[in-house]
Amino acid sequence: MTLFDKKDFDAQRFNDDATVYFAMVKAGFKRKTLSPAEFARRFTLERILQERRLCDGLALWRACRRKDCRRHHRCGGDQRKCLNRALALPREIQMRVREKILEATPPNIGRPEREARVRMPRDFYE
């Protein structure tokens, strides 16, 4: 490939990129907005998972009456009841567990999921 051919190749690639860009602009950049029902559904599903993550992170299975929870070293029952016991723990411990969960959260997670993950155990009972 000569220098002249390389220039033509780069120019063609630039034209292809520009064509794609202008097609996107012409189509319009539309943000997806969630309906309130879809937001509530996704938030509720993530809230349930977040409650379970908090139970596991706070190791509430150690004091659980269910043998399954103690055997599997994770919450296997009603996470709402278990999380209610977490309210007696110091707030610093709760915040530390929540921060670990947030560190593991991908940056491109959706708004309903992010709003559920930033909550503290007490927030689930309000």
Image (cartoon, rainbow, N blue to C red):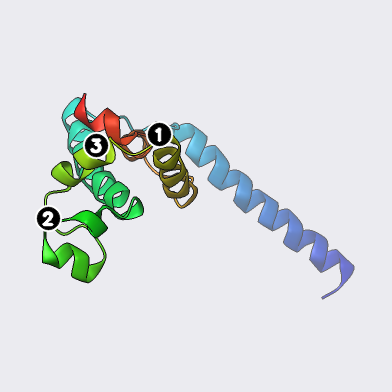
Question: Left of 62 or right of it: where is 9?
Answer: right
Identity, as a three-letter code, of the amino acid under mark 3: Phe
Q: Nearer the viewer, residue 123 or 85?
A: 85
Residue 91 x/y as whole percent: 40, 34
The answer for how far apart the CA atoms under marks 2 and 1 are is 24 Å
Rendering quarter of residue 31: top left
Identity, as a three-letter code, of the amino acid under mark 1: Arg
Residue 88 x/y as whole percent: 29, 36
Q: Nearer the viewer, mark 3 or mark 1?
A: 1
Badge 3 element: helix
Q: Residues within 10 Å of mark 2 (few under 14, many from 20)?
A: some
Rendering quarter of residue 27: top left
Residue under the point 13% across and 67% down: 68
Task: Identify the residue position indicated by label 1 in the image.
Answer: 91
Q: Nearer the viewer, residue 107 or 6?
A: 107
Badge 1 element: helix
Evaluate whether residue 26 shows in this view: yes
Task: Identify the residue position indicated by label 2 in the image.
Answer: 77
Residue under the point 17% across and 55% down: 64
Q: Which mark is residue 43?
A: 3
Residue under the point 25% across and 59% down: 62
Evaluate whether residue 34 shows in this view: no
Q: Nearer the viewer, residue 26 or 90?
A: 90
